[in-house]
Amino acid sequence: MLSEPNRQRNALYRTVALLAGFAVALFAAFWLADYFFIGAPPAPGAKGPVSQLFHFDAETLQNALGNLAQVIAAVLGIAITVVSIVVQLAATRYTSRVADMFFRDRTNLVVMGFFVVACINAVWASLSVTHDYVPQATIVMTVVIATASLLILMPYFAYVFEFLDPERVIARIGQQALQSALAANASIAQRQSAAVASLEHLTDIAINALGQKDRIIAAGAIAALRRTLCAYLPEKKNLPAAWFAVGPGLRENPDFVAMARDSVEDLAAGRIWLEWKALRQLREIFSQALASLPEMAHVVAIETRYAGEAALAAGERNVLGLVVKFMNTYLRAALNAREIRSAYNVLNQYRQLAEAMMRAPAQTAGDSNAALVEIGGHFKYYAQLARRMGLGFVTETAAYDLGDLCELALDAGAACHDRLLGIILEIDHGEPETTADERALRGVRKAQVKLATYYLLRGAEARARAIFEDMRHESPERLLSIRDEMLSVGSKDFWEVVDRGTNFDYLDDARKAQLREFFGWFGRLEAPPTAVA
């Protein structure tokens, strides 16, 4: 299968051949028509059509070759002007790396060099013709080169525009980052510097695209960061130990120079400085997305989850721990910006990462129970923080996500299950202080009740009893309203478009039956009579 550069070059060659063939056929048809049919009939013993074509007159050639040199110089000027403008616009819009990549590309160098050679050759050929001497081979070669320069011009412009296509630019930068990390043809310091520069250029492209509201390019740059990281993880075991050291050159990078020495040493000891750098770039894009295009923050969270799953598959526990830290950072940033939708989406991706950890085989996941309990603790922390900030919906979402993790842990027989159950029961500790607080705590109770119905459905009554004991002192009015609201939900699908696809409070008929049994443990629930004045 041809690589992208080879495919582009082959397309260029085919286009040139097609144009050349058409031009030759068109000229030959009219030339032969003139020679045999339109012009005067050739005299006996006259030159044939081919010989007549190459019969050069010195005086005519001197004028023609001078004009030919001007034409080729004009072609060179057009090519340089168009290329300079297009490359500069692309570099300004995306990243300065575009110009560097363009002038390192072999095809670009060959074509521009050919234009220069053609121009020089035409100038010298025009000076070589005299009244006494006509260099026929030189003239034929000059005409062929001039023809080729004209034929190449339009296909070359097509190649330039294709070369500067944003998706291809992004793909090349990602490939360069990976090649810099894995190649062995340069010093460690040069490879580290090149890899870091490529990651930063991808970040620049994403941030510039966000500023211009260009979702497609931003998403492409974010995905390229993730693809580079995921491709690097399985290969890093083959790299020398010196690659993982944070040397003086790398230490001067802005993202490393601000870090405490102990933190930098931890990155080097964990062999994860490149992963940290890539995730740091994603975090920078996430922050920019919150400010200019919040829906793209969701894309960053998705790609970060993919990176975590790749680390899990590669057995890179240190990298997985990094991903968890950055997920927490996303949540903090979303809450500080009061971006409820972004926090909701991050929690969705965070939960899916935890589910992947729970499902992973033991040989790749290792002992993930402690990590899962830690993630559960993070969910509780940000749920309670959101409640204090008046963002009750985030609190509810975290509770439902914890409930889903408890369900999966029960089915998997995970040792972390009981710890996760304890965590979800701790989210709503404390009395509500405001109306928003009350709504958030009701949402948490609904999540706990939903989990209790799952326990009863799976025959885990003792776990459902633990939830009952935590709720038994709730007021009958709140319990009654929670029960009735959950029983009234009849549609699985939420009435708005959401990524999760389901209504939090939905229970199928089997679980609604368990819901009635659960609330039966509280005795008779009735709303108190209304006081009569």
Image (cartoon, helix red, strand yellow):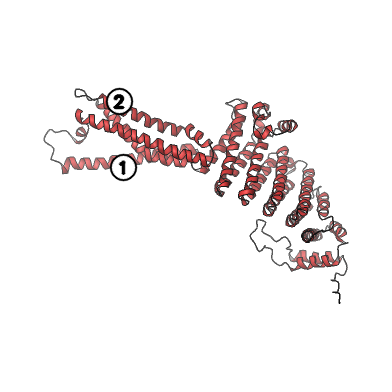
- The residue positioned farthest toward the bottom in the image shown: 533
Q: Amino acid at mark 2?
A: Trp
Query: Residue 206 lies in what quarter of the image?
Result: top right
Where does label 1 land, which residue? 22
Tell me if residue 415 comes above or below residue 263 in the rendering: below
The residue shown at (22%, 40%) is 31
Residue 469 shows in the view: yes
Image quadrant assignment for residue 71: top left
Q: Is residue 107 left or right of residue 468?
A: left
* Residue 7 visible, this orientation: no
Give the quadrant of the C terminus: bottom right
Amino acid type, label 1: Phe
Which residue does the image show at 16% across and 33% down from the upper left? 47
Label 1 neighbour load within 10 Å: few <14, some 14-19, many 20+: few
Image coords of residue 441 (percent x, y):
79, 59
Q: Could you say where residue 29 lies in the image, as x and y percent from the top left?
A: 24, 42
- Determine whether 76 is above or below 449 in the image: above
Structural crowding at the residue carrying mark 2, measured as other residues with C-alpha within 10 Å and reported as few (<14), some (14–19) or many (≥20)? some
The spot of residue 169 in percent (x, y) is 52, 40
Please name whichever residue, 420 or 482, is drawn nearer the observer in this view of the structure. 482
**Residue 101's spot in the image, x, y percent?**
51, 34
Pick whichever, 360 or 394, lies toward us.
394
**Compared with residue 336, is residue 64 higher up or lower down, i.e. above or below?**
above
Question: What residue would you read off at disc 2?
Answer: 124
Quadrant hosting residue 323 = top right
| Front residue of this view, candidates 352 and 64 | 64
